[in-house]
Amino acid sequence: MKLYFMPGACSLAPHIALREAGLQFRLIKVDYKSRRTEEGDDFRRINPKGYVPALELKEGQLLTEVPVILQYIDMIRPDACLLPDAALERLKALEWLNYIATEVHKSFSPLFRPKTPEAFLSPGRAHLSLRLNVIERHLQQHRYLTGPAFSLTDAYLFTVCRWLDDQKLSIADWPALQRHSDDVARRQAVRDALAREGLAD
């Protein structure tokens, strides 16, 4: 398998997942500005959407979108217990994956755009903060998003929370979220993924 990534982007979540699952894979870096891979290929020919992550399977098929790739990794390594098995608990995990993707991750989008007017940035941060407040309240009662055990939902949450400092927001304003991120950061797979992407402290 090949994972196309940009350092620190949302592709960090499936990168962590692949390591947690103990799977063999190749990492291929994509340049943000040129959209060319480190091998010189036009990434848009590989993934017409033009953004990471993209996971190329052994058979040549391509999977995109973080929640889909995370579920695929869990599907091929069920013994790694990366998502809950029980039906209701699994649905709750998928609920969190969708919430992070559509409410948290998406809320960063206007903040990342260099041409977003300053007048829109403050309301954008406020909107994002409201979404994080929901997670904060949940984590005040639970170690991880799905309960006492780490799951791939936590890898995705950890990934997006790394962007807070760049948006003039401090994770310290959400103590339970801070504790969660610190906890996830201590996992060996996470440390290895960060080091490989050049993001280790």
Image (cartoon, rainbow, N blue to C red):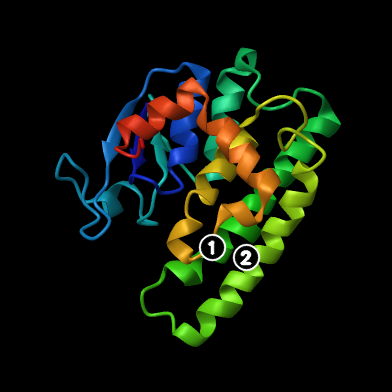
- State the SS at label 2: helix
Farthest residue toward the left?
A: 40
User: How much space separates mark 1 and mark 2, taking CA atoms?
Assistant: 10 Å
In this view, the mark in front (1 or 2): 1
User: Which residue is located at x 30 percent, y 46 percent?
Assistant: 46
Work out whether 23 lies above or below 102. Answer: above
- State the SS at label 1: loop
Callout 1, which amino acid?
Leu
User: Which residue is located at x 14 percent, y 45 percent?
Assistant: 40
Work out whether 200 lies above or below 178. Answer: above
Q: Quadrant of residue 96?
A: top right
Q: Mark 1 points at which residue?
A: 169
Q: Which mark is residue 128?
A: 2
State the residue in front, 157 or 82: 157
Work out whether 164 lies above or below 184. Answer: below
Q: How crowded is mark 2: few (under 14 residues within 10 Å), some or many (20 or more)?
A: many
**Quadrant location of the N terminus in the rendered image:** top left
Q: Is residue 57 at least partly visible in the picture?
A: no
Residue 19 on image: x %, y %? 45, 23
Task: Assess whether mark 2 and mark 1 are in contact (beta carbons under 8 angstroms).
Answer: yes
Q: In which quarter of the image is residue 83?
A: top right
Residue 160 on image: x %, y %? 53, 50
Q: In this view, does 32 lie to the left or right of 75?
A: left
